[in-house]
Image (spheres, grey):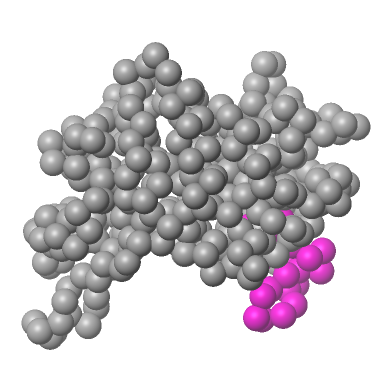
């Protein structure tokens, strides 16, 4: 899947050929997920002894970035972004090491970002665990861009909730082919009832070719399975709770009608709701010379209307199928 998806965009040969100085994970039988102790070993210097330069874009003496912690030669020009470190390890288990290297590269930064780099069908691929929220996506996209040359193909495979089911039923895959909007809580509305409490942006669009390939390959991967692939618009919120319409007694979020009266009233094509896709697409469209190409999809883990959640065994199946 990822070879077809990501070979459609050119990559820098020099970046693909640099594999020196990699920190390697232990090879496990059949699969190569990385265990927690390996991540700790990957940190080559005690945190207190690392000095950084350039407050505008900090890097240490080895030219490792401040948050993701990677340097040139450790990140491929084809990047798969996932939120969960376990899902990142699952994706990495399908990769092979480059020629002359015994293991797939793995590194965990002191900020918790995990990067795996290897080959899939001979093509250099990096899997980066983004964590949650658009600030984390900002760190990953900008810092991976800084340590690579040439064009970048960036694909997110995440999870989401569905606010329209159907079409976004449990276990389906929503491809953000129609883009993503941003939903943001407005703190100025705290003491001013005339101010809108939530902001909904216009959509940021994906790379059309990459998104079409992503949708096609997801349909192929899930062919014969009960899951469906949905082409729709996504919404990325700045919070898991308030800006996604989750209610509770502890905070006055004024979000009881958020899903219907604010999001769907303004953007009726929105099907999925998560926290990262908008910023990925927004950064790609603002990249210099449009050098970053981005697309995104997400597995529906929850239906927000019914409060139903996808069973654990089905989540495992969907993650394995979609990552591979």
Q: Residue at x 36, y 56 (%)?
A: 180
Q: Residue at x 37, y 16 (%)?
A: 225
Q: Nearer the viewer, residue 79 or 224?
A: 224
Q: Is residue 247 visible?
A: yes
The furthest residue to the right: 100
Span colored in magenta? 50-70
Residue 271, quarter of picture: top left
> Percent from the top left, x then y, of residue 252?
12, 67
Q: Is residue 251 visible?
A: no
Q: In the rendered view, tell whether residue 306 sits above or below residue 32.
A: below
Does residue 54 show up magenta in the picture?
yes
Q: Is residue 190 left or right of residue 28?
A: left
Does residue 57 show up magenta in the picture?
yes
Q: In the rendered view, tell whether residue 13 sits above or below residue 68.
A: above
> Percent from the top left, x then y, of residue 218?
46, 30
> Percent from the top left, x then y, of residue 136?
50, 59
> Percent from the top left, x then y, of residue 23?
78, 43
Q: Is residue 312 left or right of residue 51?
A: left
Q: Nearer the viewer, residue 291 or 170?
A: 291
Q: Residue at x 86, y 51 (%)?
A: 14
Q: Residue at x 32, y 66 (%)?
A: 202
């Amino acid at each position: 899947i990822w070879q077809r998806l990501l070979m459609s965009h050119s990559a820098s040969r020099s970046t693909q050929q640099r594999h020196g100085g990699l920190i390697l994970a232990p090879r496990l039988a059949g699969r190569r997920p990385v265990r927690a102790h390996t991540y700790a070993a990957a940190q080559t210097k005690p945190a207190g002894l690392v000095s950084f330069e350039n407050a505008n874009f900090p890097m240490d003496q080895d030219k490792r970035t401040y948050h993701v912690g990677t340097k040139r030669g450790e990140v491929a020009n084809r990047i798969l972004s996932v939120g969960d470190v376990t899902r990142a390890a699952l994706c990495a288990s399908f990769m092979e090491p480059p020629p002359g290297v015994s293991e797939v590269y793995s590194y965990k930064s002191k900020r918790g970002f995990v990067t795996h780099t290897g080959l899939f069908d001979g093509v250099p691929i990096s899997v980066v665990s983004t964590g949650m929220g658009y600030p984390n996506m900002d760190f990953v996209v900008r810092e991976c861009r800084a340590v690579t040359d040439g064009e970048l193909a960036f694909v997110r495979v995440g999870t989401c909730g569905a606010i329209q089911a159907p079409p976004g039923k449990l276990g389906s895959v929503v491809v953000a082919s129609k883009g993503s909007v941003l939903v943001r809580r407005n703190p100025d509305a705290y003491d001013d009832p005339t101010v809108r409490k939530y902001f909904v942006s216009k959509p940021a669009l994906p790379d059309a070719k990459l998104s079409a390939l992503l949708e096609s390959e997801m349909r192929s991967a899930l062919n014969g399975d009960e899951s469906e692939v949905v082409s729709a618009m996504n919404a990325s919120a700045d919070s898991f709770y308030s800006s996604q319409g989750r209610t509770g007694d502890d905070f006055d979020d004024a979000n009881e009608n958020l899903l219907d009266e604010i999001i769907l009233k303004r953007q009726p094509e929105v099907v999925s709701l998560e926290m990262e896709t908008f910023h990925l697409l927004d950064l790609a469209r603002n990249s210099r010379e449009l050098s970053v190409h981005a697309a995104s999809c997400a597995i529906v883990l929850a239906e927000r209307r019914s409060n139903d959640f996808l069973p654990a065994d089905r989540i495992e199946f969907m993650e394995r199928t979609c990552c591979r």
